[in-house]
Image (cartoon, grey):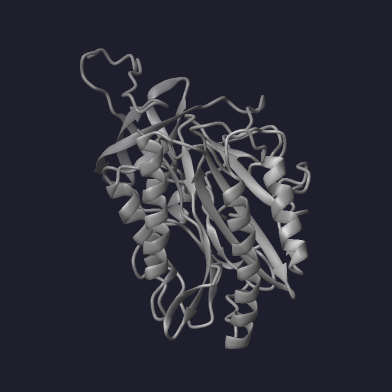
């Protein structure tokens, strides 16, 4: 699980993670254009998996074990979380409808290096509240990345997200956190989406983080489906999720999960 | 894929009712006054954040009552500081509802969302 100390990466290792991230960004771009009313989340999952394997990668989410030993390992290459689903939605027969929002989270292992990224997309036309939720969450991730500078602290990242989201009148999910990433998907440190500036471990060059604000319109409460994975808002309100894998470098934050 | 947050200070689930012990009533409240000897006046708050009225049987029904509560021994041993405005969990004896034992101080993010 997530324990131990933060393991900074050498510049060569960061490059290897960026290569993994490029495959992941390609997979997400591919499923992004496939998102439209009538498509099932299972179809999106299949597209992502074949893209990743065609590019020499392994979908890292398959077989991830839940904290609860009674829950089956995660079956998909992507997490597909529609509307009030926050994260960890299992892809399958669910059909996208006009007006839905869908959070797509995916991870790749390439040459032993992990990358992890997510984005929330509109299916057709969505209402203004939903659209604002996506804008705020996307902006929160951008702010968080801007705060990820060498010499700063983990708390700076959380504080940046918290300030922007709470000033927008939306709610941060506290039940789940971002994480260090590298040879394994989940490494130290935890990266909460709230915090105090200057709090938590210092950010040193070579630290690689998966930063992932999860934002709800309503309550911060989380309930789980009987599948043991799908996490939903307890009041049924919409939830959005954006994530990038980011390296702290001397030259500032570097997003590793972007197509070039 | 976000993992669940590890919380070292996770509030424990309320204990199972044990037949060998006198049952306790567990409620939350807000500290309204700090008294000497780690005693506090605590205003009971219901699960939805509404003020709770508890019949303490001391007459004066119109007075918004506060419960006189002491800090549980384990909290004193660990020097858990409790102050005015803090949300706390406390246990009441079913025999005397005007007295309580504070067993948990809730952190800001554990407070009932309103």
Most foreground residue, A56 or A65: A56
Q: Residue at x 47, y 58 (%)?
A: A192
Q: Give the left or right position of residue B71, taking residue A223 as reference.
A: left
Q: Position of residue A140 (x, y in %)?
A: 38, 56
**A208 or B84: nearer the eye?**
A208
On screen, B12 above or below B95?
A: below
User: Which residue is drawn at the image coordinates 67% and 51% (left, top)?
Assistant: A78
Can see residue A199? no
Looking at the picture, does residue A171 appear above or below residue B53? below
Q: In this view, does B29 lie to the left or right of A232?
A: left
As rendered, which of B37 and A13 lies closer to the eye?
Answer: A13
Q: Can residue A82 be seen in this view?
A: yes
Q: Where is residue A215 in the image (x, y as percent from the top left)?
A: 44, 46
Rendered image quadrant of residue A4: bottom right
Q: In this view, does B114 lie above or below A146?
A: above
For the point 62% across and 63% down, which residue is it?
A: A26
Q: Which quadrant of the rendered structure holds the C terminus of chain B? A: top left
């Amino acid at each position: 699980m997530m324990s131990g100390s933060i393991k900074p990466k050498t510049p060569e290792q960061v490059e290897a993670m960026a290569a993994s991230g490029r495959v992941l960004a390609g997979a997400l771009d591919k499923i992004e254009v496939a998102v439209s009313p009538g498509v099932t989340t299972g179809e999106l999952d299949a597209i992502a998996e074949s893209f990743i394997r065609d590019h020499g990668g392994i979908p890292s989410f398959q077989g991830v074990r839940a904290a609860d030993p009674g829950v089956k390992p995660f079956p998909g290459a992507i997490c597909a979380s529609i509307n009030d689903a926050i994260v960890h939605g299992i892809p399958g027969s669910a059909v996208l409808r006009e007006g839905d929002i869908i959070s797509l989270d995916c991870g790749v292992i390439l040459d032993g290096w992990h990358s992890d990224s997510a984005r929330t997309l509109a299916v057709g036309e969505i209402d203004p509240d939903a659209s604002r939720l996506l804008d705020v969450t996307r902006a929160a991730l951008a702010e968080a990345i801007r705060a990820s500078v060498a010499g700063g602290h983990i708390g700076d990242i959380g504080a940046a997200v918290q300030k922007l989201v709470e000033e927008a009148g939306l709610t941060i999910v506290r039940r789940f956190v971002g994480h260090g990433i590298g040879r394994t998907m989940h490494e130290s440190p935890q990266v909460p989406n709230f915090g105090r500036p200057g709090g938590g471990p210092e950010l040193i060059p070579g630290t690689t983080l998966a930063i992932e604000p999860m934002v709800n319109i309503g309550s911060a409460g989380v309930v789980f489906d009987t599948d043991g994975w799908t996490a939903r808002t307890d009041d049924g309100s919409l939830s959005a999720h954006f994530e990038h894998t980011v390296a702290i470098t001397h030259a500032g934050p570097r997003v590793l999960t972007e197509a070039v | 894929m976000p993992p669940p947050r590890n919380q070292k200070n996770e509030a424990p689930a309320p204990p199972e009712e044990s037949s060998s012990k006198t049952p306790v009533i567990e409620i939350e409240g807000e500290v309204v006054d700090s008294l000497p000897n780690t005693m506090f006046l605590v205003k009971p708050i219901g699960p939805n954040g509404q003020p709770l009225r508890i019949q303490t049987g001391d007459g004066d029904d119109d007075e918004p009552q506060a419960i006189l509560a002491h800090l549980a021994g384990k909290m004193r041993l660990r020097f858990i500081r409790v102050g005015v405005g803090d949300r706390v969990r406390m246990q009441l004896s079913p025999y005397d509802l005007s007295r309580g034992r504070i067993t948990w101080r809730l952190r800001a993010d554990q407070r009932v969302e309103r």
